[in-house]
Image: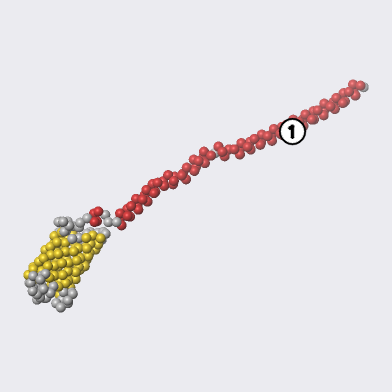
Amino acid sequence: MLKQVVRQPLVSVVSRGTVIGIIAVGAVSALAAFTSGATQAQVRAQQPQYQAPYQVVQNQPAQAPQAQAPQAQAQAQARAQAQAAKAAPSQSQLADDPAFWSFSAGWFDINKQKNEAFEGRIEYRDDHKFWGFKPFGGVMATSDRAAHVYAGILMDLYFGRRWVITPSFAPGWYHEGDGKKISDGIQFRSQLEIAYRFDDRSRIGISINHISNAGINDPNPGSETLALTYSIPTSGWLGR
């Protein structure tokens, strides 16, 4: 009887211990699972830090324009220099022009307008320089059968790449014909011309000149002519 009394509480204690043990084991297992899950979550949260190298690799193409910036800047500077060179006259453009054939047509005695006539001229303008001057020569004729054969010097003064001012002076032999009486013989011709230069070096310009004998002979009324002149390089005229 006593054994039964002692055995029942012992069984009860064992049974309770077993239940408590099972509960404790379950709690420990649950805690371990929770802890493991939290650890894995932390690991996943830290994974992007290890993906940074891949992001750097992906971002490298975006840095290419920065690497190309010096090259683009150099190209822009080259274009700017080319435009500046085009706008500014080059040494070849400012160099002395070649020899010319010049053809002129104008209004004789335009100032006093007492013996007006048509005037035509043909000139050869050499390209050799002597102390800054170039030799030239020509012949003039009017519709009143006056004529002037002359030779002298000129000087080209360049303003930029397009404009040229050419003063000239030439003595020559004059025949008055049926026109204005300014006496036969020596007449001095002084002229000022302003011309526009084309890319092929030809020119078109306007000139005003004065003819007189400087008081050598009488009468000496003198005469002025306003003319339009077109000059073409001799190389172009000869087809070379």
Residue 80 percent across, percent down from the top left: 35, 53
Residue 143 percent across, percent down from the top left: 13, 74
Q: Is residue 36 shown above or below 186? A: above
Residue 20 occupies which quadrant of the picture?
top right
Q: Can I make out residue 160 in this image? A: yes
Q: Amino acid at mark 1?
A: Ala
Q: Which residue is mark 1?
A: 27
Identify the secondary structure beneath mark 1. Answer: helix
| Residue nearer the viewer, 40 or 151 | 151
Q: Residues within 10 Å of mark 1 (few under 14, many from 20)?
A: few
**Which residue sits at x=38%, y=46%?**
71
Q: How is the image coloured?
A: secondary structure
| Residue nearer the viewer, 233 or 185 | 185
Tell me the quarter of the image containing the N terminus.
top right
**Which residue sits at x=47%, y=45%?**
62
Q: Residue furthest front?
A: 215
**Which residue sits at x=33%, y=55%?**
83
**Which residue sits at x=24%, y=56%?**
93
Residue 161 occupies which quadrant of the picture?
bottom left
Q: Is residue 216 shown above or below 59? A: below
| Residue nearer the viewer, 147 or 200 | 147
Q: How many marks?
A: 1
Residue 216 percent across, percent down from the top left: 8, 70
Q: Can I make out residue 237 in this image? A: no
Tell me the quarter of the image containing the C terminus.
bottom left
